[in-house]
């Protein structure tokens, strides 16, 4: 593996061919005539539906600055270095060549590099794949394009496409990203309220827990010298979970974006009928509990109650189906590794840790022991 | 142009890696082909970070949906990051209703190291009786429960090797793999005990031990393929306490779990690179899918495979070893037969290729402690096991044809997402479904669910022989193809009525262990897979059984295909009966036995 500096700050790494081929062989190599991976996330005929999990491209992986790490000698110094070594992701672009008309040169440029400076892709020997890897700060969203023989193209693999300045760009985001990608502000407000009901963090004891965590967490962060990307969230666990879902729908479970779009529209309509001119965030929480109950019992127009007046069943047939989806996403977001953008500051894990404290004050959910430092306590395993 | 090797080994898991290891260390030149990726622990990774993470979404990923033209089209599934994707390379099974469905059951992780990367590491030997179930049952008076027609007596087979024949290879496997456990308390005879010292058990496991003890069952620490101290044969150090909540279904980022990558392949690559005296050459090609074998007369003359890009390649060797896991090995041999009818005539001269497919009778019991709680995040897969239900006396007392190992599970349900996604559901295909449908599990109720289940659930499992049935079989599916357009494996299997009886008896034993454990508990349940023909336990065995009669077996006692001079099969498909324990150690021991024969041939 080599490292080099491009421009002022973007360091490109070159993972070995095995690393690249591990993804390409599994996800890309195949008979492309068979389109077996479209379960609602693509427009009919999208060639991405022939490949497995096209959302994996570009590959956004952990990054560990081992050059800095090996330079450290003292234990105290090592801690600082380990912390600093986790500031980035390694983003690996893959461009698949056209067999009939192979490219002579491929580069990538975008907002991840200063002045959109382009990074050349290299061809992996004996394959149709070109690749380049760059280190990118965590918590970021970037737009990029390929330049193939001097002509600009969006990434044919990556399903994340956006229009910016009137033209199409490919998009990726890194770990612990808190930039909203799919939900509008009001959608996030409604979702946050529903998730407050779905998740266990809003009972009286849970609120006390959150208060305690505000104090202890800030002390711990200071002690560990942690830069905390999630600071603006002010510990609202549900806001983190909504962010997790936002990222999941932007990437891995894009096929469910339509469920959220349609159902949030119905729910907003139901709420507007009952609370005209009140922002979703200002509607009292008990109303959301009632709404949840009504939606969860409704599997179609025949089981609709007056509480659901405004729900258009021609747009979304089975409201309870949506709540099942939301609950799976919510609990996953609350307890998945914080890299996915939920479980902010490991608040879900801290909650469970405190929930199952034994008589002698020791927790029976010791997540810290196995999770990487500085998020957890484990200094042998790097996350 | 074809490359030429001393041996080509197809598959790098428990059946393949020991062959490559033995032959290369004997100075031979070996090509090791693996369909899946080479995922590396952090100390072997050029980026300094492991491809395996302590991350619940690695074991069970995002939702996908089956798009294949099958009865369960549209059904959601959640696969791990190393299982073959269901839409790309499904296993199709025929259900009770005669309809075909794709299933995650019976999937073996597809990567360098195979199933040993994700397994819990339970590394039990089979019992002496497991090797001679035909002899054992031949002389018994009367009929067995559920077996009025004497199927068991007709279909049981002795292995062509005995426990004592395999015993030195068990010792060798235990040495080379790196296993912690205790031999005291096991009913099997050990000529050598190379177990590493087990770590202190998780305190919750004491209830399993107390239950076993109360019932007069001798218990021992479950042998687990995880190192607890320096392991000289593989040159591994214990970098950290191996006990975490990320055990079964997780690759180990620190290579303390003794996957065949960690215990054999990686050390072998190092030895080759260091130019150790007498060492041969290992060419490891991950991401390479073997499409078919070709033969000239009685010799397999070529191995056709796809490079990572899908480009075609061919290699040849003096010896060819197939070890892709039972279902995929049988599939490969059938696919080769389609390309070349002469190959087909030789490999299936007995008509038994794919037949007598086996898995395990398995099940157990589980409860929830009401007055105590333990930290299950400090765990390996299992702490205590007993051979009590494998003794001849036990079999006679309960009218069973074969016995079972029983052990407790320690690392299950230790993490919050796993608690939710396995809530009320028992298998991979149904994961998340009960949680999704339980609309009441919100707010304080969800808090109660987490509070009542975290660190409080204990389960005890049994693993037992399944009666061999000719109609339990692997074929090629007539219409469903993989991502390369090749027919996929078609699994048709069911349970014998005696299996149902055996599972009832064993599940009751597991239940008794919990009842006698001295704990205060609620929510005690017990059960087994007998009601579901689809269930496979991820132990896939048989389909190319070995034996002494070419009309009654696919392989000879050396695991060589009867009518080929140079074709061997060394994954679990060689087994004529499935053994009363997890199969991996036996696959490894047998592969070492066969490797020794191959070394002598080269």
Image (cartoon, rainbow, N blue to C red):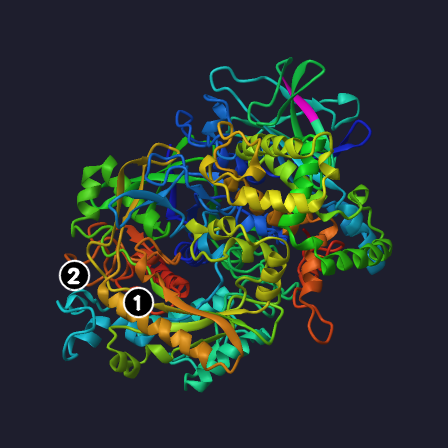
Q: Residue B592 location, x and y as percent?
A: 39, 62
Residue A11, magenta (yes or no): no
Depth check, front residue: A233 or A292: A292
Secondary structure under tag 1 reads loop
Asked whether residue B47 appears in the rendered view, the answer is no
Q: CA distance from mark 2 to mark 1?
A: 22 Å
Q: Residue B45 location, x and y as percent?
A: 62, 48
Which residue is found at the position 20% from the left and 67% from the top? Answer: B156
- Determine whether A60 is above or below A375 in the image: above
Magenta stretch: give its range.
A143-147
* Prevalent SS, magenta region: strand
Quickly name the residue at label 2: B549
Chain holding disc 2: B
Q: Quadrant of residue A131?
A: top right
Q: Are marks 2 and 1 in contact (CB under 8 Å)?
A: no
In the rendered image, the quadrant that contains the N terminus of chain A is top right
Side (left or right) of A332 relative to B222: right
Pointer 1: residues within 10 angstroms few (<14), some, or many (20+)?
Answer: many
**Label of residue B465 in the image:** 1
Side (left or right) of B140 relative to A72: left
Depth check, front residue: B557 or B376: B376
Pointer 2: residues within 10 angstroms few (<14), some, or many (20+)?
Answer: some
Secondary structure under tag 2 reads loop
Side (left or right) of A379 relative to B53: right
Q: Residue B271 location, x and y as percent?
A: 54, 56
Q: Are marks 2 and 1 on the same chain?
A: yes
Depth check, front residue: B170 or A10: A10
Which residue is found at the position 39% from the left and 40% from the top? Answer: B89
Which residue is found at the position 32% from the left and 74% from the top? Answer: B505
Q: Quadrant of residue B143?
A: bottom left
């Amino acid at each position: 593996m080599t490292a080099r500096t491009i421009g002022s700050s973007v360091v490109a790494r070159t993972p070995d061919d095995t690393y690249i081929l591990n993804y390409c062989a599994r996800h890309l190599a195949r008979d492309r005539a068979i389109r077996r991976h479209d379960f609602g996330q693509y427009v009919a005929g999208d060639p991405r539906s022939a490949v497995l999990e096209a959302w994996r491209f570009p590959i956004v992986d952990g990054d560990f600055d081992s050059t800095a790490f090996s330079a450290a000698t003292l234990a105290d110094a090592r801690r600082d270095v380990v912390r600093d070594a986790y500031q980035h992701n390694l983003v690996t672009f893959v461009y698949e060549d056209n067999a009939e008309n192979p490219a002579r040169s491929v580069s990538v440029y975008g907002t991840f590099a200063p002045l959109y400076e382009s990074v050349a892709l290299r061809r992996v020997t004996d394959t149709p794949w070109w690749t380049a890897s760059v280190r990118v700060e965590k918590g970021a969203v970037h737009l990029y394009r390929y330049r193939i023989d001097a002509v600009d193209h969006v990434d044919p693999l990556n399903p994340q496409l956006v229009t910016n300045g009137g033209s199409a760009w490919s998009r990726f985001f890194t770990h612990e990203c808190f930039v909203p990608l799919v939900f509008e502000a009001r959608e996030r407000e409604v979702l946050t309220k529903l998730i407050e009901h779905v998740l266990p963090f809003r009972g009286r004891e849970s609120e006390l827990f959150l208060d305690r965590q505000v104090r202890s967490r800030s002390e711990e962060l200071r002690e560990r010298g942690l830069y905390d990307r999630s600071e603006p969230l002010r510990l609202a666990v549900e806001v983190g979970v909504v962010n997790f879902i936002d990222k999941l729908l932007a990437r891995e479970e894009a096929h469910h974006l339509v469920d959220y779009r349609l159902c949030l529209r119905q729910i907003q309509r139901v709420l507007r009928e009952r609370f005209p001119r009140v922002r979703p965030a200002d509607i009292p929480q008990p109303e959301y509990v009632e709404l949840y109950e009504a939606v969860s019992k409704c599997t179609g127009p025949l089981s609709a109650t007056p509480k659901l007046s405004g729900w258009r069943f021609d747009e979304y047939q089975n409201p309870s189906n949506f709540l099942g989806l939301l609950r799976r996403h919510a609990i996953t977001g609350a307890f998945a590794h914080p890299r996915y953008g939920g479980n902010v500051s490991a608040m879900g894990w801290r909650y469970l840790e405190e929930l199952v404290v034994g008589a002698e004050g020791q927790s029976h959910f010791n997540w810290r022991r196995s999770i990487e430092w500085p998020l957890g306590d484990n200094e042998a395993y790097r996350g | 142009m074809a490359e030429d090797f001393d041996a080509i080994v197809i598959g790098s898991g428990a059946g393949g890696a020991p062959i490559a290891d033995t032959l290369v260390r004997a100075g031979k030149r070996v090509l090791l082909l693996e369909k899946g990726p080479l995922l590396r622990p952090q100390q072997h990774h050029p980026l300094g970070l492991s491809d395996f993470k302590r991350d619940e979404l690695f074991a069970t990923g995002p939702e996908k949906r089956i798009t294949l033209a099958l009865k369960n089209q549209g059904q959601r599934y959640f696969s791990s990051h190393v299982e073959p994707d269901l839409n790309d390379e499904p296993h199709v099974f025929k259900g009770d209703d005669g309809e075909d469905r794709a299933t995650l059951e019976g999937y073996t992780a597809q990567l360098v190291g195979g199933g040993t990367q994700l397994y819990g590491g339970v590394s039990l030997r089979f019992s002496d009786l497991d090797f001679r179930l035909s002899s054992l049952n031949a002389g018994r008076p009367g009929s067995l429960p559920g077996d009025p027609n004497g199927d068991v007596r007709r279909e049981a087979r002795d292995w062509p090797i005995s426990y004592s024949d395999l015993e030195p290879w068990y010792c060798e496997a235990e040495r080379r793999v790196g296993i912690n456990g205790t031999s005291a308390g096991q009913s099997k005879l050990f000529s050598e005990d190379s177990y590493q010292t087990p770590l202190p058990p998780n305190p919750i496991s004491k209830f399993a031990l107390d239950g076993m003890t109360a019932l007069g069952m001798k218990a021992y620490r479950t042998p687990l393929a995880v190192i607890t101290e320096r392991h000289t044969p593989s040159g591994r150090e214990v970098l950290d306490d191996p006990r975490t909540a990320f055990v079964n279904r997780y690759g180990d980022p620190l290579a303390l779990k003794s996957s065949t990558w960690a215990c054999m392949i990686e050390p072998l690559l190092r030895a080759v690179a260091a130019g150790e005296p007498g060492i041969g050459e290992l060419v490891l090609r991950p991401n390479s899918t073997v499409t078919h074998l070709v033969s000239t007369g009685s010799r397999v003359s070529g191995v056709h495979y796809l490079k990572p890009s899908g480009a075609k390649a061919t290699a040849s060797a003096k010896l060819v070893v197939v070890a892709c896991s039972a279902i995929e090995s049988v599939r490969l041999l059938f696919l080769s037969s389609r390309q070349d009818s002469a190959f087909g005539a030789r490999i299936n001269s007995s008509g038994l290729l794919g037949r007598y497919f086996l898995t395990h009778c398995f099940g157990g019991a589980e409860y929830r402690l009401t007055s105590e709680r333990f930290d299950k995040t400090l765990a390996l897969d299992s702490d205590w096991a007993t051979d009590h239900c494998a003794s001849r006396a036990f079999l006679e007392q309960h009218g069973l044809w074969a016995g079972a190992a029983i052990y407790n599970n320690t690392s299950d349900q230790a993490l919050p997402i796993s608690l939710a996604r396995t809530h009320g559901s028992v298998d991979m295909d149904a994961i998340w479904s009960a949680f999704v449908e339980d609309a009441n599990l919100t707010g304080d109720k969800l808090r109660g669910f987490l509070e009542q289940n975290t660190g409080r659930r204990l389960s005890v499992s049994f693993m037992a022989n399944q009666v061999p049935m000719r109609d339990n079989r692997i074929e090629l599916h007539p219409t469903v193809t993989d991502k390369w357009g090749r027919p996929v494996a078609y699994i048709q299997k069911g349970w014998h009525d005696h299996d149902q009886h055996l599972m009832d008896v064993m599940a009751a034993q597991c239940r008794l262990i919990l009842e006698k454990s001295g704990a205060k508990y609620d929510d005690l349940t017990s059960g087994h897979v007998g009601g579901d023909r689809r269930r496979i336990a991820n132990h896939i065995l048989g389909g190319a059984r070995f034996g002494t009669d070419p009309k009654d077996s696919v392989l000879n006692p050396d695991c060589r295909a009867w009518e080929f001079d140079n074709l061997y099969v060394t994954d679990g498909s060689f087994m004529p009966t499935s053994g009363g324990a997890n199969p991996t150690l036996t696959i490894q021991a047998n592969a070492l036995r066969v490797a020794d024969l191959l070394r002598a041939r080269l």
